[in-house]
Image (cartoon, rainbow, N blue to C red):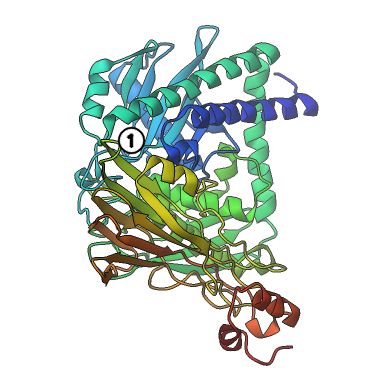
């Protein structure tokens, strides 16, 4: 049995994380699409050979992929065992985006590669990149009215895109024949594969330096310690049952809200999450596959206890009752394009709402909770080529005990950020006429919510189709402990002198815009924390001076008389 000293264990832990960080950086720096190179909508990790459980993930990766990538890696392992008799070769790379096989939505494409050391399979390397398009009904893949997954794009089971390091041109041709702007995807494909090659080199160096036995022992010990740390964080929570709810505006097809009903049972050092009372499966694309549903809970708890390191041990004290029969356990052929970017954030919001009752000093009001997915697809006559612009935006964070929420923070599910407007204007025939804080959108409270943003896009050339899958258009992010809800998501399209508001408020597709037409979007503000009447008058005056609120809003939201 290998004995590890604390210094060696810490060095190997950081070494594993650094391998993943370098994969992330290699992917970002070589990717073609702004959603990856600028928005950083991607993740890389190292996974177990037997069941695909998480060993390490880069600090720069999206948190929502923490849970899902281990499930998709497991699906690849099961495929290898069933189809290839368990045999893989160095240089093999599998591609998969099937949501029902441990995925999210079809645009999140995973590459999975076996890692060998001294001729033996040591681990799996995997990454996810958000492709700007995978075919389907609308440019960008976010179809608000899809009723089956085939309408959302090309669905790939695990298949070898690279065989012994050589790309399979026939499989590549199938992929490129089923997606838009195919000529621009090869850069992302090669970048994604190159990131895994970088990881292969760095992990080899780490194992050569410390030895296979020592590194394996460190991986096992790190998993054990992560579970211990998570249990130590859970233990002080009072035993009991806590309830929280969250609402999705609609599924994009049926204009009725969907409800997530979260029950959390705390006993000893474990938490059990039960969402079986949630709304049934829906017709539109707001169903969530089980891998994304589980990952949403993992990321929510990581928000609450950020100091616990990430590996499979982190999740061991978290028990999840599979929400069979609800829209949170999608089965084929339910459409799922909104699951990762939107539904996952509603799940996290329900977790936050429930645990606020138990540990209010460690929690916060709800953040904006939407990625604000917006897709422009068209043809640029000046450059004589087709394009797809996909962007996601920030919003306000919720207030917390001791401080106001952050304005224009990234979404709950990740650290990805909207590509700079200057970059988007260079790539696409559009002009941002406005990009500003959405004043007044932060929910009132003793500690108010942060502000969302407001932006305006004008189409300059050609004709385009606009689609969106957003949320919090009906009701803003929840305030807690007496705090008010944050401002709602708003979309306006100005075309031919008329203003169009989507019937579902936050979801629509195939809106035709022509040169000079304008799309205006306001993202939600964060919820407020605590009684607004208890807000420090000096802070209210500061908000007024900065233009965050008008005097009328202050009088209405915080009251003319304050302590």
Local secondary structure at mark 1: loop
**Quarter that holds the N terminus:** top right
The answer to which of 346 and 485 lies nearer the viewer is 485
455 vs 95, left or right, is: right
Residue 538 image-quadrant placement? bottom right
User: Residue 264: x, y in percent?
Assistant: 52, 62
329 vs 355, left or right, is: left
Above or below, 376 relative to 279 = above
The answer to which of 207 and 83 lies nearer the viewer is 207
250 vs 2, left or right, is: left
Which residue appears at 33% of the width and 37% of the height? 101
User: Residue 57: x, y in percent?
Assistant: 56, 34
In the displayed orientation, state which residue is furthest to the front: 382
**Quarter that holds the C terminus:** bottom right
Q: Please count the marks in the image.
A: 1
Can you see residue 5? no
The answer to which of 183 and 56 lies nearer the viewer is 183
Which residue appears at 36% of the width and 57% of the height? 458
Above or below, 109 relative to 261 = above
Find disc 1 in the rendering and name its residue.
97
User: Residue 90: x, y in percent?
Assistant: 44, 11
User: Residue 299: x, y in percent?
Assistant: 53, 50
Which residue appears at 47% of the width and 54% of the height? 393
Crowd rating for badge 1 (residues with CA inside 10 Å; few <14, some 14–19, many 20+) = many
The answer to which of 512 and 309 lies nearer the viewer is 512
In the displayed orientation, state which residue is furthest to the top: 119
Residue 480 image-quadrant placement? bottom right
Above or below, 368 relative to 484 = above
Above or below, 310 relative to 477 = above
Can you see residue 354? yes
478 vs 77, left or right, is: right
């Amino acid at each position: 049995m290998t004995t590890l000293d604390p210094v060696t264990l810490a060095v190997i832990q950081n070494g594993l994380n650094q391998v993943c960080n370098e994969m992330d950086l290699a992917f970002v720096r070589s990717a073609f699409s702004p959603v990856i190179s600028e928005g950083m909508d991607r993740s890389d990790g190292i996974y177990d050979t037997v069941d695909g459980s998480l060993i390490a993930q880069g600090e720069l990766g999206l948190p929502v992929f923490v849970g899902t990538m281990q499930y998709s890696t497991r699906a690849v392992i099961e495929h290898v065992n069933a189809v290839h008799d368990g045999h893989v070769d160095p240089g093999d790379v599998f591609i998969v985006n099937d949501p029902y096989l441990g995925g999210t939505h079809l645009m999140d494409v995973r590459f999975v590669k076996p890692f060998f050391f001294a001729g033996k399979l040591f681990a799996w390397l995997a990454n996810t990149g958000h492709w700007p398009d995978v075919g389907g009904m609308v440019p960008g893949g976010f179809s608000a009215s899809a009723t089956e997954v085939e309408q959302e794009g090309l669905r790939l089971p695990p298949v070898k895109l690279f065989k012994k390091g050589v790309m399979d041109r026939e499989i590549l041709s199938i992929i490129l024949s089923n997606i838009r702007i195919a000529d621009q995807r090869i850069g992302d494909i090669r970048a994604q594969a190159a990131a895994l090659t970088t990881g292969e080199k760095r992990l080899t160096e780490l194992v050569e330096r410390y030895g296979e036995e020592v590194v394996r022992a460190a991986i096992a010990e790190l998993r054990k310690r992560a579970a211990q740390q998570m249990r130590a964080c859970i233990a002080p929570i009072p035993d009991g049952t806590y309830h929280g709810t969250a609402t999705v505006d609609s599924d994009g097809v049926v204009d009725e809200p969907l409800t997530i009903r979260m029950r959390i049972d705390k006993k000893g050092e474990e938490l059990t999450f039960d969402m079986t009372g949630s709304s049934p499966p829906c017709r539109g694309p707001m169903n969530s596959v089980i891998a994304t549903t589980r990952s949403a809970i993992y990321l929510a708890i990581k928000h609450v206890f950020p100091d616990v390191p990430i590996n499979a041990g982190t999740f061991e004290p978290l028990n999840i009752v599979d929400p069979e029969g609800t829209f949170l356990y999608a089965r084929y052929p339910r459409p799922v394009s909104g699951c990762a970017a939107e539904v996952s954030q509603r799940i996290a919001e329900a977790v936050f709402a429930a645990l606020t009752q138990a540990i209010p000093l460690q929690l916060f009001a709800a953040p904006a909770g939407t990625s604000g997915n917006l897709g422009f697809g068209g043809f640029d006559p000046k450059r004589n080529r087709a394009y797809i612009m996909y962007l996601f935006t920030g919003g306000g964070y919720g207030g917390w005990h001791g401080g106001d929420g952050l304005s224009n923070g990234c979404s709950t599910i990740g650290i990805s950020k909207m590509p700079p407007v200057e970059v988007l204007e260079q790539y696409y025939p559009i002009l941002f006429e406005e990009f500003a804080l959405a004043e007044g959108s932060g929910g009132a409270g003793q500690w108010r919510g942060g502000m969302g943003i407001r932006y305006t896009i004008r189409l300059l050339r050609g004709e385009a189709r606009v689609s969106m899958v957003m949320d919090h258009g009906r009701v803003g992010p929840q305030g807690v402990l007496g705090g008010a809800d944050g401002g709602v998501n708003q979309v306006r399209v100005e075309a031919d002198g008329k203003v169009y508001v989507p019937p579902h408020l936050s979801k629509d597709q195939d809106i035709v815009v022509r040169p000079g037409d304008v799309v205006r979007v306001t993202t939600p503000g964060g919820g407020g924390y605590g009684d607004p009447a208890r807000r420090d008058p000096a802070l209210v005056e500061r908000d007024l001076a900065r233009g965050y609120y008008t005097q009328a809003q202050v009088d209405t939201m915080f009251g003319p008389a304050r302590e």
